Image (spheres, rainbow, N blue to C red):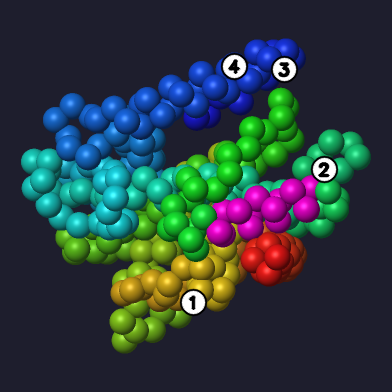
Amino acid sequence: MRSIPRSIEQTGDEDKTRSLWADAWNNSLDRMSTPVAGQPDQDVATFEITTRLLKRVEDAALRLEVKPLDNSVIGTLAERSINAFNTSFFGTTSLIVVHSHLLIFIHLLAKAICLCISAKAPEGILQIGVKPPRKQLSEGTQRLSELLCAMRDHRDPAAALAYIAPVGWFLWHPVYSIVDCMELFVVAHEYAHLLMTKGEGIFSPEYLNATSPHDEEHSADLFAQVTVIADANPADIYLAVLSPLLLFKSLALMEQESILPPAEGHPASSQRLELLVQSLTLLATRPTPRTPLLDMVGVWSNVERLLEDAWAMAVENIRRRHSK
């Protein structure tokens, strides 16, 4: 999907733009319906995306001096939950499975929340953590409310309305960076579970409660957080740091509104967010201060407040529609 915006920007013809979008969309649907040879329940499009993500996790693990798994593979199961487990299903020892609906959810979520937490300065610079213009905020909360309804009523993000962003949309870059980092976080989290299953040591900071039944989940989150930062392009470090926090804040708000049920066998998303913010604060100051991380610790409070305000507006939109 990364190639679609670049293709569209090459033309100013509105009809041609629509045609390019339609062709790209049909091609994506076709690839998502095409199985990977010899691997049941795997579609070509998602399998390629997730395989690239897995390779980046393994590269980051090496940089973090964590021994990568032998013979690992990643797969997608269309109608099964996100999970990580050891199996010989594909003749390998380590398999990560990612629900394909998660990828759709992350993409639509990023498009909605970027509208709600950013604004373009007069000189054209994108500012994160700044209240957007009223029209932009209204658009973002509308899309957010549609996504929430799709998740609440259908448990399927694809049930939300689809929008075609305009040519040269100023949020394309942050949206795709956030989507990329959220996806990488999910794969790295599941990879961490496999590392722990095989007895490989990963991050277990002293502030984790060793007796907590959720200690393993928090450790996997921290491994994923550091993996995303280690993988990040220096030009996108702010978005890389922000992405996992946006994901868990959004999930926490959905759990709070009963749009999603509490996660079984996992800590509440609000608890996971709290630990990630705490971890980020330590990473920003130890062993020496790191300016980009310190900056994001400060910016996060603004972003969180903006997201909470937008969420409240989106929920109110849903209530007004249902009261008519």
Foreground mark, 4 or 1, reads: 4
| Label pair 1/3, CB-CB below 8 angstroms | no
> From which residue to which does the magenta span run?
136-149
Q: Residue furthest front?
A: 324
- Circle 2 sits on which residue? 120
The local secondary structure at tag 4 comes to helix
Compared across the picture, whether 72 is left or right of 244 comes to: left
User: Which quarter of the figure is the C terminus placed in?
Assistant: bottom right
Q: Real-space Cα distance between discs 2 and 4? A: 29 Å
> Which residue carries the number 1 mark?
271
Residue 103 image offset from top left, x and y in percent: 44, 45
| Mark sitting on residue 19 | 4
How many marks on residues? Answer: 4
User: Alpha-carbon neighbours of circle 3 within 10 Å: few (<14), some, or many (≥20)?
Assistant: few
x, y percent for residue 138: 78, 53
Mark with earlier residue (2, 3): 3
Image-based side of 84 in relation to 294, left or right: left
Labels 2 and 4: the sequence-earlier one:
4
Q: Secondary structure at mark 1?
A: helix
